[in-house]
Amino acid sequence: MTGTTTADAVPYFDVADPGFSITSAAVHEARESSWYARTNYGLAVLRHAEVSALLKHPRLRQGSVAWPAHHGVTEGPLADWWAGWVLNKEGEEHHRLRRLMNPAFSPRLIGALVPRFQALATELIDGFAEPDRCEFMTEFAEPYAARVIAVMLGLHESQWPVIARESTTLGLAMGVTIRQDLERIEDALAALHDYADELITDRRRQGRDDFVSRLVSTSRDTDKLSDAELRDGLVLLIFGGFDTTRNQLGLAMQSFVRHPDQWRLLAERPELGAKAVEEVMRVNPTVRWVTREAVEDLTFQGVDIKAGTTVHLWSESAGTDPRVFGGRSFDITAEREPHFGFGGGAHHCLGHFVARSDMSEALPLLARRMRGLRLADGAEWLPDSGNTGPVRLPLTFTPGS
């Protein structure tokens, strides 16, 4: 279902329909007639100004906490892990967890890894099976994202297939097929919990100057992370860091295929890598919506929103809102208003600096080495809602030096 209009002229979208696309013309047309739409989950917010305001609204809480329950998953390992996320906590508990976890995301620690990110990207490009084509997700995006996580955690990079396999399966929990995939999801969660436990035990025996050691040392402070918080936080880092980077790199390549002039510019001006990441995440974010839930009744711009209502803030629709960004141009040199690819407000993504750093190093190298980028036949995609990205992305190109 692409969209219908209710009797009061408010657009409606069935976002659980496999054929629904959150980036469709129907959604962009709806944005012109209304700042919001109704969906089978609640409300969808379509415009930049309203998304920005509602991200920080005091009567809305982080809403993804209710996602499993929307699909009948109310108990068991996944429900327990989901409820324990820092992302799904509020108030003082949320503030405490962020305060305890923040030191591990030290810019100094991440900055020291930049040369490794550059060497890794070069190694993977050099290793393409054919000189002028690749299946981008399996030959670059997946190993790059997983090995970045391994480097951060102080793991041997040969373990990247485990990170990739289990994180990919756990990522099914973000989609509308969560219920039918539940057994596979919980098996992957158990494997990552075991992985995290091994890391924690190792660092307690002998600490290092790495991310895990910083979290483990935090857990020994007077006001400390519990063992469960530490383990759940590590699993969230492994999963979130891999899934976001892999998908966003694939979506970046899709965007640059559509804008070859910008790809050439990035090859010529690698210092634009950071701005390229921001522009891709504005127009083609892997996180298609940010979720909030009304904790009490409220009225916003004349619309009554009952307590318990799910409010989806559609990041791509907001990021391409012509009221703020003009036409649908893609320009990696432009100064832009903030996008919502990392959420916003109190729940702004804790690991945003990692994702920005590793992608801003990879994209200019890819642009220099993969000239004349083209999409080949056989691409496959996750559903265009929630979190999305390519499953397969065959590309052809002219090798560069």
Image (spheres, rainbow, N blue to C red):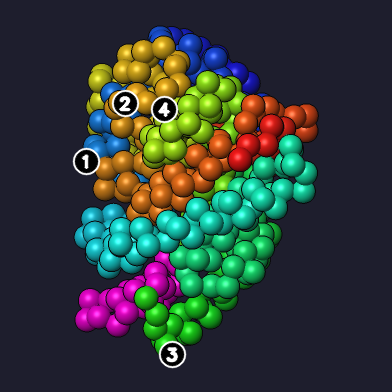
Between label 4 and label 3, give the one nearer the viewer.
4
Type of amino acid at the residue the image marks with label 2: Arg
Q: Classify the position of the N terminus by image quarter.
A: top right
The alpha-carbon separation of the residues under discs 2 and 1 comes to: 26 Å
Between 232 and 158, the one lying in front of the other is 158
Residue 53 drawn in magenta: no
Query: Residue 364 location, x and y as percent?
Result: 50, 39
How many other residues sit within 10 Å of disc 1, few (<14), some (14-19) or many (≥20)? few
Type of amino acid at the residue the image marks with label 1: Pro
Query: Residue 162 location, x and y as percent?
Result: 65, 66
Q: Is residue 107 above or below residue 18?
A: below
Q: Classify the position of the C terminus by image quarter.
A: top right
Q: Say the numbered circle drawn on residue 58.
A: 1
Type of amino acid at the residue the image marks with label 3: Arg
Q: Say the numbered circle drawn on residue 205.
A: 3
Q: Say the numbered circle drawn on residue 336.
A: 2
